[in-house]
Image (cartoon, grey):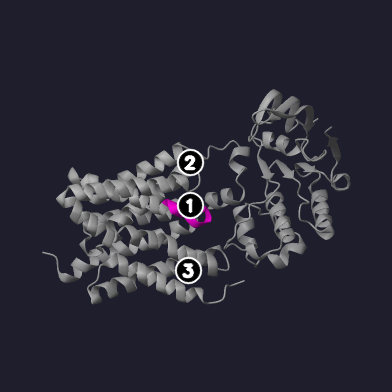
Amino acid sequence: MMSLDTLFAVPFVSGLLVAAALSAVGVLLRLRNEWLAALGFAHLAGASALIGLAIHVPAVFGATFGAATGAAVKTLGRFRGNTVYALMILAGWSVTLLVAANTALGSVIGHAMVEGQLYFAGLSHLTAAALLAAATVAGLYWLMPIVIRNRFFPGHDAANRVPAWRWHLAFDLLTALGMAVATATVGLMGAFALVFIPPWLAFRSAGNWKQALVISLSFATIGYVAAFLLALWLDQPFGPVLVALLLFAASVMQLRPRIA
Amino acid sequence: MPQPLLVANGLVTGYTEPVIGPLSFSIGPGEVVGLWGANGCGKSTLLRAIANKAQIFEGDLEQKPGLTLAWQMQQPVRLDEMPLNGHDYLRYAQASREPPPARMTPWLDRRIDTLSGGQFQLLAVWAILGGWPDLVLMDEPTNNLDPEGQQTLAEILKTERGMRAVLLVSHERSFLEQACDRVIEIE
């Protein structure tokens, strides 16, 4: 039987790993002006998680499958920009609500996913979050220089006949994995807030790229820990508390002057 | 005689239909070659064809095997928010040559979205020239540059002679004459 400490330690560490990973991925998404991707993948993850549960597949695996499929379609279909993500959001939202409305389990899980019931995260979530963190560290070590160079010098790969689809797909899959694990762990809007708000703040206030990463990571993890404790103390659903706290903190910090 | 890096034979290139050509020319190692012509004659399209971004309708464009290219576009990518300073920008561009031109030194610690148009243009040019490609394609690099910036660019290009090949497109004939070994004129 798990102790009370273990009961909270597993969700806490799962969410912390997710928050750290998303804050780094989000910085690159913002640089690529593809932050809407996160919301698109999150909706697909939510829908496929519910469909997976209907056939007894754990939510974290179902979510990953749906988001990864979206990433593959986006890359191989050579979609660029935000239109494809808007379509993902609409499709994911529609399927999620239809599955939730027509199955008893779907209804319960659907609500949990929207509310971000982090405290129900178990060992499968922790395992997935650890894999995500490892994939993010390894993936970004390889991908970050390529993504940044191609953002500012977009003709480089074509001029040198380098097949760019490999790293496009790798980055999309990393984003999809991150949003899938995060959606199943901290809820749909909690995941989106972690990938959007910390990088937004970092882009405004950082003096250089390293600072941007540090600010995003620090803001996301500190905000996450504070939300975890606050939601527990106030007995509130985790997702809305996290979003409200990040928004409030970001608003306060935005009042500070920008670093030149 | 060293093998040319790039040889065009009767090249006709464009997008959905031909824009420029037929053209025949070659670029050897270490040459700084200017490409001059009136606005709209297809100079940028020729660079895009070399960079594999335009279609070849007729003729050949042969590259030396293993040729590495850098391509400076007419308008450098400039985002509303860019949390990179000049050092970051050069590092991710793989512009590792030291030292950068002295005029740029004060800008390198600043965020690149705080630079003026001319400062950013010169930084973007050095980001391309400061790496180690065999052939550099430059499209109107004097855009946004004041006379002092143009002079700095001409001096940088003079130092490139013999080191690497540069194909430079500009509508400013006097600048090409000043900076290049030879100028190809497109009618």
Is residue B6 shown left or right of residue B84? Answer: right
Determine the secondary structure under disc 2: loop
Name which residue type carries label 3: Ile
Query: In 3D space, how far apart are the residues under numbered discs 1 and 2 (Cα atoms)?
Result: 12 Å
Q: Nearer the viewer, mark 2 or mark 3?
A: 2
Whole-percent x, y for residue A219 in the image: 42, 70
User: Looking at the image, is mark 2 or mark 3 earlier in the sequence?
Assistant: 2
The residue stretch that appears in magenta: A29-37
| Circle on res. A223 | none
User: Looking at the image, is mark 3 or mark 1 earlier in the sequence?
Assistant: 1
Are labels 3 and 1 assigned to the same chain? yes
User: Looking at the image, is mark 1 or mark 2 earlier in the sequence?
Assistant: 1
Tag 2: Cα neighbours inside 10 Å, few (<14), some, or many (≥20)?
few
Tell me where residue B101 sits by quadrant. Answer: bottom right
Residue at the left extreme of this rendering: A1
Tell which subunit mark 1 falls on: A
Could you tell me which residue is drawn at 14 percent across and 69 percent down?
A3
Tell me where residue B40 sits by quadrant. Answer: top right
Q: Which residue is mark 1?
A: A34
Name which residue type carries label 2: Phe
Name which residue type carries label 1: Glu
Is residue B131 shown left or right of residue A75? Answer: right
| Circle on res. A215 | 3
| Circle on res. A79 | 2
Whole-percent x, y for residue A111 in the image: 23, 58
Inspect this view and state whether residue B100 appears.
Answer: no
Tell which subunit mark 2 falls on: A
